[in-house]
Image: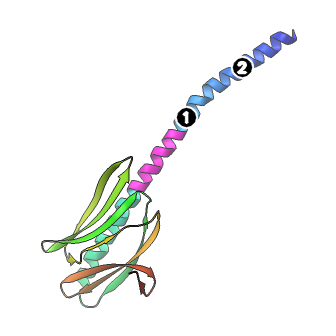
Amino acid sequence: MKGQVNTELLVIVGAIILFFIPILLTVYFKASESNEQLAEYQTRLAVSRIAYLTNSVGNMGGDSEVIVEVFIPSYVRNIEFRPVGEGGEIIFRVEREGETTEVVEVVRFKIAQQALNPTGSGYMRFRISASGDKVDIEKVVSPGIVAP
């Protein structure tokens, strides 16, 4: 009798384990996929926010400026601001699984060429200021201190 109970208990525990392992693996892979999607949305948000504020500051003209703080995901390897024709481009280069893609926004105002290499993920501040017919975007370490 004891042998039969032990065998039945072993079979039930084995069945439960066989049932839960695929579920746990599925949850693990879905969580990883969700983190990648979140990082993609955060990158797109950062680029569009900087572009929107660049256009806003350019439209205000004069000596207007704004400081914006955006979250940079760890996948972002390079941030580039560059003039193109009469406007400019804001480019975030993203590297995941050996594949490099670019998230690009076009702005209406000429911007100075600059490239930044963020280290890890975190918040980064930028000062966006208008001067004449162009807009300058520079990294700010803390309020009032511009990064080299």
Q: Quadrant of residue 76?
A: bottom left
Mark 2 Cα shell of 10 Å, populated few (<14), some (14-19), many (≥20): few
Q: Earlier in the sequence, mark 1 or mark 2?
A: 2
Where in the figure is residue 49, as x and y percent of width and height? 34, 69
x 36%, y 48%: residue: 98
Taking the view exactly as shown, the residue that stands out farthest to the bottom is: 63
What residue do we see at 81% from left, 10% from top?
A: 4
Q: Main secondary structure of the magenta part?
A: helix
Front in this rendered view, residue 132 or 75? 75
Q: Residue at image x 87%, y 8%?
A: 1
At x 29% / y 71%, what residue is drawn? 52
Q: Name the image quarter holding residue 84.
A: bottom left
Dot in front, 1 or 2: 1
Point out residue 80 in the picture as x, y percentages from the top left corner: 29, 68
Quarter of the image with the C terminus in it = bottom left
Q: Which residues are magenta?
A: 28-40
Q: Amino acid at mark 2?
A: Ile
* Residue 95 higher or lower than 6, as above or below: below
Amino acid bearing label 1: Leu
Would you name the residue on which mark 1 appears? 25
| Residue extending farthest left | 85
